[in-house]
Image: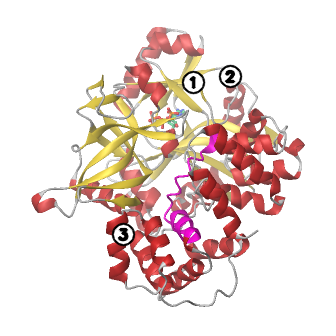
């Protein structure tokens, strides 16, 4: 298939925001595709290039894109920048510059999806001396192999800002419609591999394949999430008595896949972080006795001096770190607290009761000081639960209450478990705009628009402005992240693709006409940047309606 055929589809999608119409356009398109190409094209339709589990990023900064547009269109770099300032949108800038292309080069060949995939998959592998030049050449060649509209979409794909309004819900429904499958079967298949490129290829070649989906080792399973409770009583009401109550550790949730000596680690976001945690891999090698296993744990950073747990911010440095891993291991050693089992020796444990999953997990680990089961008790008594809760908030974040008889429901925030924390006035929100600072800080972004997720419409709705709570280091970090996500800009602010998730504390939620969510947060304060959360996992409008 040619890239330009896909561009027509993108353009049709961009003309509507109605979910049913988006689904219709895509399902008609999916029907025409070959099963070997539908996987990658499905990702492109969602504005993605790689499935999250591959842990790859294109890392195309706006500046490199500007250089590529200049090279491909034969314009001066300053001219492209000028156009960017006029249009505010880098995709539109590419379209404009390419339509005014000075040197009319012979288009040797139109860009095919296959070639596009080859180049996009090659880009993250290029490193070392001369790598910027090589990337620049490749990207500008791609731009010159399509027309100006194609260049606009190509640019948007590469900077991660497609904005076609196509989220996971639309993809699920379009695939179901195209191949006569049930949306709930498509969703279940997705939750088991967390990769719509795999689901699309399967349902295309044989819709029966997704009815009883199998767990695929090394392809992460969408993690089961938990509801919140406000008190011990409410927590017991949700999960039943007796329940297992465990310390809620403040670390990184990890899903570990092991087959013999091959071990991989995935985050809650399904990113593959195996390279960053060779120490965790070594622990699993030494202490997990099962040959084939998928289990979950919380990885917590500890101070090498005091051997006390470190706040998540420290560990998050390790998640981002690509180089000098050995130094990072020494600076922030880890411990692993294991709490759930999904697969053991080829037996799928998802539908087993939690108490049985826990028992089997216990038998599969030779516990020691660095890898162990999460501390917990089984009880039906409020007083015992209160006691562990008080310990839990002193040592860590709180406690988890888990139903003894519930299965593991991938990808669902169900009441099979609830969390109880010390202070619950916090939300995870997405940064969608950043404002330039004033005076001395005018080259910095100093305040940020916070948005919540509108699950129904796959949109982000504003809910407040964040201007306080940053350490200097966090502000620097936010500025770096913002720069990578700019879609458009004016004199006062930049509009961002919704990539950055932050946890904020606040005093109150009020009704307000100022923000598109209809609510405003009073005194929001940054707690931390949530690298481990996807934007569509941020607090949603439904949750906020409930809190109000
Ligand atoms: P939060 O923002 O409260 O950390 P979350 O939104 O990231 O939560 P939830 O599913 O709501 O995710 O809360 C559960 C999280 O708590 C898990 O994702 C996991 O990372 C962490 N956790 C810590 N200790 C445990 C434990 N013993 N059992 C289960 N999860 C635990």
Residue at numbered disc 2? 406
Q: Does the stretch in magenta take in 91?
A: no
Mark 2 or 3 closer to N-term?
Answer: 3
Q: Are marks 1 and 2 in contact (CB under 8 Å)?
A: yes
Q: Are marks 3 and 1 in contact (CB under 8 Å)?
A: no
Cα distance in 3D space between marks 3 and 1: 49 Å
Q: Which residues are magenta?
A: 149-170
Q: Position of residue 330 (x, y in %)?
A: 41, 61
> Which of the two residues, 91 or 297, is positioned nearer the viewer here?
91
Confirm or reject: label 3 Cβ below 8 Å from ligand 1: no
Where the C terminus falls, by quadrant?
Answer: top left
**With 201 as the anchor, is 72 left or right in this view?**
left
Residue at numbered disc 3? 84
The image shows a total of numbered marks equal to 3
Q: Residue 412, located in which quarter of the rendered image?
A: top right
Visible residue check, residue 215 = yes
Q: Are marks 2 and 3 in contact (CB under 8 Å)?
A: no
Q: Residue at x 54, y 10 (%)?
A: 237
Q: Residue at x 45, y 14 (%)?
A: 232
Q: Position of residue 141 (x, y in %)?
A: 58, 83
Confirm or reject: label 1 Cβ below 8 Å from ligand 1: yes
Near mark 1 (Cα within 10 A), the count class, few <14, some 14-19 or many ≥20, is many
Q: Secondary structure at mark 2?
A: loop
From this view, report whether residue 431 is shown above or below residue 386. Answer: below
Near mark 3 (Cα within 10 A), the count class, few <14, some 14-19 or many ≥20, is many
**In this view, the mark in front (3 or 1):** 3
Residue at numbered disc 1? 417
């Amino acid at each position: 298939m040619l890239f330009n055929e896909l561009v027509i589809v993108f353009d049709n999608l961009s003309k509507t925001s109605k979910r049913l119409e988006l689904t219709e356009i895509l399902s008609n398109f999916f029907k025409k595709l070959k099963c070997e190409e539908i996987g990658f094209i499905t990702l492109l339709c969602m504005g993605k290039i790689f499935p999250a589990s591959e842990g790859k990023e294109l890392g195309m900064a706006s500046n490199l894109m500007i250089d590529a547009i200049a090279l491909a269109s034969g314009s001066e770099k300053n001219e492209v920048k000028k156009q960017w300032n006029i249009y505010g949108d880098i995709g539109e800038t590419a379209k404009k510059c390419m339509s005014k292309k000075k040197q009319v080069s012979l288009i040797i060949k139109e860009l095919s999806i296959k070639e596009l995939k080859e180049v996009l998959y090659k880009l993250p592998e290029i490193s070392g001396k001369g790598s910027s030049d090589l990337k620049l050449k490749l990207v500008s060649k791609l731009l010159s192999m399509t027309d100006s509209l194609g260049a606009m979409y190509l640019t948007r794909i590469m900077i991660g800002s497609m904005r076609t309004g196509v989220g996971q819900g639309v993809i699920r429904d379009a695939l179901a419609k195209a191949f006569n499958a049930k949306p709930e079967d498509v969703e279940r298949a997705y939750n088991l591999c967390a990769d719509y490129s795999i689901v699309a290829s399967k349902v295309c070649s044989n819709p029966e394949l997704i009815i009883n989906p199998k767990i695929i080792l090394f392809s992460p399973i969408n993690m089961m999430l938990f509801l919140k409770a406000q008190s011990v009583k409410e927590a017991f009401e949700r999960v039943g008595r007796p329940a297992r109550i465990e310390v809620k550790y403040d670390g990184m949730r990890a899903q570990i896949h092991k087959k013999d000596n091959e071990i991989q680690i995935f985050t809650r976001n399904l990113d593959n972080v195996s390279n960053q945690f060779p120490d965790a891999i070594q622990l699993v090698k030494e202490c997990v006795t099962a040959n084939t296993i998928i289990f979950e744990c919380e990885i917590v950073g500890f101070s090498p001096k005091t051997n006390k747990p470190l706040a998540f911010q420290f560990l998050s440095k390790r998640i981002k770190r690509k180089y000098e891993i050995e130094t990072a291991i020494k600076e922030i050693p880890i411990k692993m607290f294991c709490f759930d089992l999904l697969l053991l020796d080829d037996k799928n444990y998802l539908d087993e009761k939690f108490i049985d999953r826990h028992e089997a997990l216990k038998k599969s680990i030779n516990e020691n000081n660095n890898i162990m089961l999460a501390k917990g008790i089984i009880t039906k008594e409020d007083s015992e639960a209160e006691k562990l809760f008080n310990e839990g908030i002193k040592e860590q974040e709180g406690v988890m209450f888990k139903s003894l008889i519930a299965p593991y429901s991938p990808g669902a925030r169900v009441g099979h478990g609830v969390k109880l924390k010390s202070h619950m006035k916090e939300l995870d929100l997405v940064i969608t705009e950043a404002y330039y600072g004033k005076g001395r800080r005018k080259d910095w972004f100093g305040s940020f628009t916070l948005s919540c997720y509108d699950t129904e419409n796959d949109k982000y709705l504003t809910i407040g402005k964040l201007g306080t709570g940053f350490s200097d280091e966090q502000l620097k970090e936010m500025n770096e992240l913002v720069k990578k996500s700019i879609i458009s800009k004016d004199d006062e602010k930049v509009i961002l693709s919704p990539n950055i998730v932050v946890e904020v504390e606040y005093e109150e939620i009020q009704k307000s006409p100022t923000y598109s969510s209809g609510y405003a947060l009073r005194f929001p304060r940054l707690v931390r940047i949530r690298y481990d959360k996807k934007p569509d996992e941020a607090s949603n409008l439904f949750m906020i309606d409930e809190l109000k």
